[in-house]
Image (cartoon, helix red, strand yellow):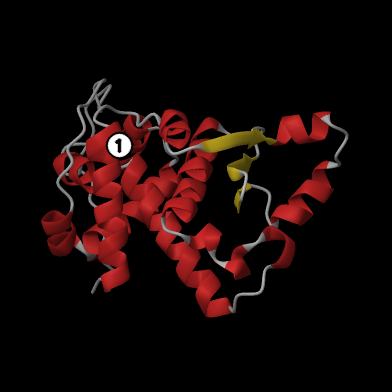
Amino acid sequence: MMTERDRAVAELADELVRRHALTLPVPIERICALYGARLLPLSELTGRGMARDAVFACWGNSDGVALQSRSGCTIAYNDRLSNARMRFTLAEELMHLLLGHAADEGFSVARQSYDAATYERFEAEAKHGASMLLLPPTVYFRYRERCGLSAIASLCGVSHACAWTAARYYEENEAELRALFHAAPIVTGSPVSRPLRPRRVSRN
């Protein structure tokens, strides 16, 4: 059962797809730019002499972080990961910004002070939003019966693990997501390069 906050995340992702992402794979870097998020790759930071481990310690992870200040918004990210992983990081951190997480005083990289429950909620909301932006529920529902999950992941430029996690969430909340999410991106390439047996994620 989706909460009111879950539904708000789905509505935001739907709006983003309808406005900016009607072809696949979703142009996540362009969308970040449209919303004023400067992209700061790890290679730029290490090029300035910062140690990689020190950067990761500051971020609190090795993927990336959203930063918001009076001077604007920045998404710092690890550009040494796979393209699919980087795309998901950019989408997740953009969601942190658009959902207002980065404006929360406790979210600051310099003084993270939120409790575990708040952290888990912020992370879940941003991850669900990122999944819906990069692999819209409408795309999953359209192709799940005729394509393997790996083919759908490839079409959307995400990892198989990301697609699997998204599919579980979509299956568990299908009725509500069908009512909330309407954006149907145009497929720019065939989702199936060879015949695949229909595969559906288990509800268990």
Local crowd at mark 1 within 10 Å, few (<14), some, or many (≥20)? Answer: many
Location of residue 145 in the rendering, given as x and y in whole percent from the top left corner? 15, 43
Location of residue 58 in the rendering, given as x and y in whole percent from the top left corner? 76, 55
Location of residue 122 in the rendering, given as x and y in whole percent from the top left corner? 48, 66
Pick out the residue farthest to the front: 70
Location of the C terminus (image quadrant): bottom left
Location of residue 132 in the rendering, given as x and y in whole percent from the top left corner? 32, 48
Residue for point 41% across, 62% down = 125
Whether residue 81 can be seen here: no
Residue for point 51% across, 71% down = 120
Q: Nearer the viewer, residue 15 or 127?
A: 15
What residue is disc 1 on? 152
Residue for point 45% across, 44% down = 91
Q: Nearer the viewer, residue 188 or 17?
A: 17
Q: Is residue 186 left or right of residue 55?
A: left
Question: The disc labelled 1 sits on which kind of residue?
Answer: Ile
| Residue 23 position (above or below residue 7) | above
Q: Is residue 104 left or right of residue 26?
A: right
| Residue 56 position (above or below residue 82) | below
| Residue 4 position (above or below residue 9) | below
Q: Secondary structure at mark 1?
A: helix
Q: Nearer the viewer, residue 34 or 78?
A: 34
